[in-house]
Amino acid sequence: MASAQDWKEILQEEFSKPYFDELVEFVKGEYATGEIYPAGRNIFRAFDKCPFDKLKVVIIGQDPYHGPGQANGLCFSVGEGVPHPPSLKNIFKEVYSDVGSPIPVSGELERWAEQGVLLLNAVLTVRAHQAASHAGRGWERFTDAVVRAIAERKEGVVYMLWGSYAQKKGAIADPQRNLVLRAVHPSPLSAYRGFFGCKHFSAANAYLQSIGKEPIDW
């Protein structure tokens, strides 16, 4: 397969399935009648910012943030000027203790995405103030197809699977052909049980360098 394939080509079959048509109709109706996050233009931002041929790392989240101004289409990320949510605070703490990158003022993770980190939520939209309100509508099936496409078409990918939900979703990744890193979720409920000290960021970079790829500037 050509290395310059893009997401649209790779996921074309998925876009043409009946469940995806139903999902689109549901999501359109939700945006037309209520306050939905992220902004419509950012629903597929994770793919826009991390082209398939540049992808090096996959981080899987679950549901977009449902507070005003938070969700921006990249899992765990928030827009400029938005206070860091608790899980993101803990991610930045681990980055600092692992590789020494100072904790940034901005919680916008676009700079990671542009270096080849796919920041993929399992569900791509949510109603304001209603966690998991768009779960079970088809997004999970679509994002399973995304993870499957990566697993089938790419090797030498780092999968960072934080928490049981992400680990289940990423279970298809072949640890013989990729680096599969697992830890508890970075939320305050679990971070002290093994997210802090997991050293995933340095492990990812050591692996990428070992296969001749540029490390990520975390």
Image (cartoon, rainbow, N blue to C red):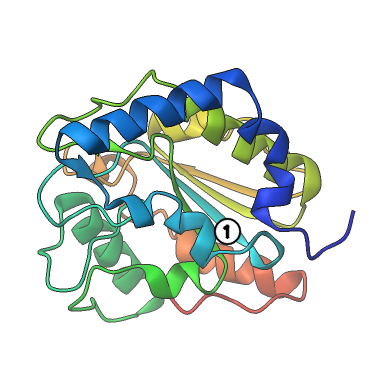
Q: Is residue 162 left or right of residue 103?
A: right
Up-down relation of residue 75 to residue 132 (above or below): below
Q: Secondary structure at mark 1?
A: strand
Q: Is residue 104 visible?
A: yes
Quarter holding the C terminus? Answer: bottom left
Q: What residue is drawn where x is 82% and y is 63%?
A: 3
> Image quadrant of residue 69?
bottom left
User: For the residue carrying disc 1, how many other residues have a C-alpha within 10 Å: few (<14), some (14-19), or many (20+)?
Assistant: many
Task: Please name whichever residue, 70 or 216, is drawn nearer the observer in this view of the structure.
Answer: 70
Q: What residue is drawn where x is 21% and y is 75%?
A: 106
Q: What residue is drawn where x is 73% and y is 46%?
A: 10
Residue 166 horizontal/vertical position (percent): 45, 35
Count of residue discs:
1
Residue wearing tag 1: 57
> Image quadrant of residue 18?
top right
Task: Please name whichever residue, 73 or 155, is drawn nearer the observer in this view of the structure.
Answer: 73
Q: Amino acid at mark 1?
A: Val
Q: Is residue 74 visible?
A: no
Up-down relation of residue 31 to residue 16 (above or below): below
Residue 169 horizontal/vertical position (percent): 53, 30
Residue 52 horizontal/vertical position (percent): 67, 59
Residue at the right extreme of this rendering: 1
Q: What residue is drawn where x is 45% and y is 70%?
A: 112
Task: Please name whichever residue, 190 or 32, is drawn nearer the observer in this view of the structure.
Answer: 32
